[in-house]
Image (spheres, rainbow, N blue to C red):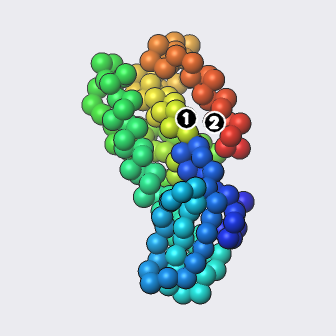
Amino acid sequence: MRCSVHGESHLYLGKHYRLKIAQGDENSVKLSRGFFHVTLRDEPNPEGAKKLLSKWYWAKASLQFNNTLERCWPRVARFAGSKPAISVKQMQKRWGSLSDKRTVTLNTNLVKAPKECIDYVVTHELCHLKHPDHSAEFYKLLDTVSPGWDKVKHKLELGMV
């Protein structure tokens, strides 16, 4: 569990960045030269930094996941019907899910994983548009549209536990 204290390491797209917390004119989070620069108007404190980082991750997750959908969609478009919507949510036990209403919901923390891992999760959920279960047909389709997915899944599980 992260405490959001100065010097702590945080992940974004599979890379580690050190946290620098300072007081400044505005509340902001910037990623620059290997650091998360968190600026707080009030006295720098872990709780304030944590809230700002959480908002920052949420915004970046939404942007990254929509970009990922655009990148992965052509692999599955021929069998998947209309393109689903993306939803971002804090999830305890899953990286993603597909609703009956064709919404792909992705865990906010997935934005901390490398892009190839995000691609895997999105592609996995998109394959559920054709096969809603984890049947042999589902895995055959996943193998076809995302060869080597099992190695990427393993990388995700090892790096993000």
Characterize the local packing of mark 2: few (<14), some (14-19) or many (20 or more) Cα atoms within 10 angstroms: many
| Residue at the bottom extreme, as displayed | 42
Q: Is residue 127 left or right of residue 114?
A: left
Query: Tag 1's secondary structure?
Result: helix
In the rendered view, tell whether residue 47 sits above or below residue 18. below
Q: Is residue 103 visible?
A: no
Which of these two is toward me, 79 or 150?
A: 150
Name the residue that disc number 2 marks.
156
- Is residue 100 positioned above or below 56 on the image? above
Contact, CB < 8 Å: mark 2 with mark 1?
yes
Q: Give the image quarter of residue 154.
A: top right
Q: Earlier in the sequence, mark 2 or mark 1?
A: 1
Count of labels in the image: 2
Give the residue drawn at x 47%, y 13%: 144
Q: Position of residue 13 (x, y in %)?
A: 54, 45
Q: Residue at x 60, y 74 (%)?
A: 21
In the image, what residue occupies the spot 64% across and 80% down?
45
Residue tagged by mark 1? 117
Q: Is residue 157 visible?
A: yes
* Image position, residue 95 (x, y; %): 57, 41
Name the foreground residue: 120 vs 100. Answer: 120
The amino acid pointed to by label 2 is Leu
Dot 1 amino acid type: Cys
Badge 2 marks a residue whose secondary structure is helix
> Within 10 angstroms of label 1, few (less than 14), some, or many (20 or more) residues?
many
The circle drawn on residue 51 is none
Residue 39: percent from left, percent from top: 52, 76
Residue 17 x %, y % = 61, 55
